[in-house]
Image (cartoon, rainbow, N blue to C red):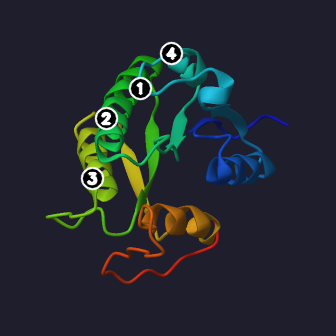
Amino acid sequence: MTPVARITVIGGTGLIGRKVAARLREAGHEVRAASPSTGVDLVTGAGLDDALAGSSVVIDVSKPRTYDPDAVWRHFDLAARTLAGAETRARVIHHVALSAVGTQRVPQPIPFYRAKAHGEAILRSSGVPFSIVRATQFFEFGAQIGAQAGGEGTDATRVADTQVQPIAG
């Protein structure tokens, strides 16, 4: 069977990326999982051209390795610029980006959302046709989110004053 399309999933070995890649394979697509564990670094671009070679679609479900506000900004800024250049060189015909509900609201007080919105702006100006899929937080990330909200050295947990409706990954 000839694959319907060759698709590169950026972040394709992570929790969400593995699920996306599996569904695409089930639908008959040829899928490449691109992530640090497969030798692809979005920030430096290492391995990216090879990962995108021959792909018509890129699905980006990547996330930064840390949630430090400066590191998050750096990740989404450099990753978006690096990926846009690689997609242009590879002649990718469509980019699908996973984003979060709320990133489009300005001003954005949450550093992760502000950085994600910045990356989306770079995507919009890249010249590569795109779709942005917005999702709420995933149930699977609940423990991680709770751990990050904990007060250092206290029993307190800081929670943003916002409504959240998690979904299953």
User: What is the quadrant of residue 13 in the picture?
Assistant: top right
Q: Residue drawn at (37%, 36%), measured in percent from left and top?
A: 75
Query: Is the residue marked by circle 1 packed among few (<14), some (14-19), or many (20+) residues within 10 Å?
Result: some
Q: Position of residue 76 (x, y in %)?
A: 35, 40
Instruction: In the rendered view, tell whether residue 111 sits above or below residue 156.
Output: above
On the image, numbered disc 2 is attached to which residue? 74
| 167 left or right of 33 in image | left
Pointers 1 and 2 in contact (C-beta within 8 Å):
yes
On the image, numbered disc 1 is attached to which residue? 43
Q: Earlier in the sequence, mark 4 or mark 3?
A: 4
Amino acid type, mark 4: Ala
How far is disc 4 from disc 3 in space, using C-alphas? 24 Å
Q: Earlier in the sequence, mark 1 or mark 3?
A: 1
Amino acid type, mark 3: Ala
In the displayed image of the protein, which residue is found farthest to the front? 153
Dot 2 falls on a residue whose secondary structure is helix
Dot 4 falls on a residue whose secondary structure is loop
